[in-house]
Image: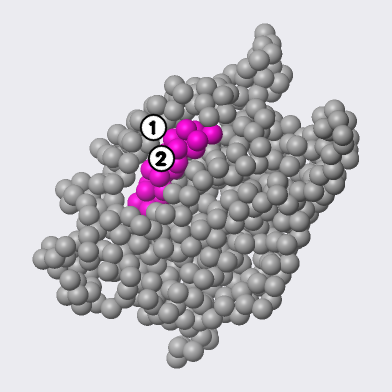
Amino acid sequence: MVFSINNKVSQPEKMKSNLEQETEQGIFRRILIEWRNISILLFLYTLQGVPGGLAGSIPLLLQARGSNYSDQAIFSLVTWPFNLKLLWAPLVDGIYWKRMGRRKSWLVPVQYLIGVTLLFLSFHVDSLIDSLEIMVLTALMFFLNLLIATQDVVVDGWALTLLKRENVGLATTCNAVGLKIGRFIGYGLFINLASPDFSNKYLRTVPKSDVGVVTLSGFMFAWSIIYFVCTTLTFFCKKEKDADPEIEHAEVDEDKGNKIIVSYLRLWRIIKLPAVQKCLIFCLTCNLAFAASVLDDLKQVEAGLSKEILAQLSVPLVPLGLLITVLITKWTSGLRPMSLFRNTYGLTLLSAGILAAMVPVTSFLSNNGTFPWWYFSLLLGINIFAAICFTCTGLAQVAFITKISDPSYGATYATLFNTGINVGAIGSATLSLWLADPLTVKSCSSDGLCSTVFDGYYVETIACMIIGVGWFYFWGNNVITELQEKPESAWKLGTVRDECRVV
C-alpha cells in the first residue's frame, strides 16, 4: 500500500494507476496470507461489540417500562467514554510491561475487568430496569463502556502492528465486521431471545407468557464467562511481535525521562499538526446531520411497531453489512478511501430522511400492532438502503484514519480521530434526545388528556437535513479533496528522539 496521497508529488500517473490496480487485485491474496491475525482482530472486535449492542437494547427495555425522553437522554451518557478515551490513550501507548507485550499489558487486565463488570451487572440489571433506577444503571453501564473504550484503544493500536504495514487497510474491514457481529448479538439476537412472543412461537414447545428464553441478567452472565475464557486464551496463546526498531529507539529515550509526560507531549504535538487539526474539525462535524437518527427506533416503537419486529428486521442487515464491507474493501484499502464518503454522503442523508418519514407511515398503518403484508417489505428495503449508505460513509472514515495514522503511536493517532467522530456523533445524539420533548408541541384538554400537535422529532430531522446539505456543499466536499491530497509527511511527527528531548 502506498501512503503518499498528494497528487502534486512528482509521481507519474501511470505508476499510480498500476499501484491502485495492484491494491485491488491483491486483496484476497493478502487476506489469505494474514488470516490468523485477521481472525484475532475479528474476534477482539466482536467481543467489543457485544456490550455495545446490549447498551443499544436497554433503551427499548426502558421505554417498555414507561421511561421518558429525559430518562433516555440521561442513559445516553453511557456512550460518552468513547468521547473521553483520548484522555488515557497516550498512557496505553507509553506504559506497558515489556515481557507481556505493549498491547497485551492492557488488553488482558481490561478484558478481565469487563468480565467482572458483566458478572456484577448480571445480578442487578433486571431489577434496576424494572424500577427505572436510571442514575444507578447509567453509572454502571458508563463504567462498563469506560472499559470497552479502553479495549477499543488497545485493539486499534494493536491492529496497526499486528498486520503487515501494506495490509493495515484490512484492519478497517476487521473493525466493521467484528463490531457488526458483536452488536447484532447484543441487540438483534438478545431482543428476540428475550421476547416472550418470539420464544413461544419459534423456540418453545410449552408457551410461557411473561418471559423469553433468556433475560438480560442471564445474557450478561453468559458473556462474562465468555470474556474470562477468551481473555485467558489470548493471554496464553497469542504472542506479540517485537516492536519496530523506530519504536524501540523511542522507548530507550523515554526511559531517560517520564513516559507519561512524553506521551501527553506527543499527543499535543500531534494535535498541533495543521493537517490533523483540519481532519479533526471534519470528524467533529461530519455526523451532525444524523443526530436525529438516534430517535428512529424509539419513535417507531411509539408509533406501534414492536421492538421484537425491529430486532428481527436487523437480522438480514447483518449478513448484508458483512457482504458490503467485503465488497467495498478495494475502495477502503485503496489510495483514496474518502472518495467513497464523498460519493455516498448525499444518499446517506436521503436515507436518514426516508427513515424519519416512515414513522408517520407506521402510525397511520398500525392496527393494534398489525400491519399490511407489504409494509414490512417496504420497511426492510428502506433499512437495507440506509444500512448500505451508512456502512459506506462509516467505513470510508475509519479507513482514512487507519491510513494516515502513524503506527509508532497507533493508539494515540487512531483514538484522536475516532474521538472526534464520537464527540460529534454522540454529543449531537444526546442533545437530540434532550430536545425531543421541549420541541414537541402538545394540546391538552380540560380533563388532562394531551395530544401531540407537532412532534419535536420532525423539527430536529428537518434541521439536521438542512445542516447536512449546507455542511457538504459549502465545506465538506472541498475538505475531502484537501485531506486526500496531503502527503504522508503532513500526518507524521518529527523524529522520536527529538520528541523525547523536550522532556
**Is residue 322 or residue 104 the one in the foreground?**
104
As helix, strand or loop, the secondary structure at mark 2 comes to: helix
Q: Residue at x 32, y 73 (%)?
A: 269
Could you say which quadrant of the image residue 502 lies in? bottom left
Measured as percent of width and height from the top left, residue 320 is found at: 65, 47
Please state if 136 lies on the left or on the right of 471 as rendered: left
Residue kind at label 1, given as amino acid type: Thr
Q: Residue at x 35, y 68 (%)?
A: 406
Q: Residues within 10 Å of mark 2 (few under 14, many from 20)?
A: some
The label nearer to you, 1 versus 2, is: 2
Give, as a single range, the part of the protein colored magenta.
Answer: 134-159
Q: Main secondary structure of the magenta part?
A: helix
> 180 above or below 398?
above
* Residue 143 disc label: 2
> 168 above or below 444?
below
Measured as percent of width and height from the top left, residue 485 is found at: 51, 81
Mark found first going from the N terminus, 1 or 2? 1
Measured as percent of width and height from the top left, residue 372 is found at: 88, 35
Q: Alpha-carbon distance for marks 1 and 2?
A: 8 Å
Residues at discs 1 and 2 in contact (Cβ within 8 Å): yes
Is residue 197 shown in magenta? no
Question: Which quadrant is the C terminus positioned in?
Answer: bottom left
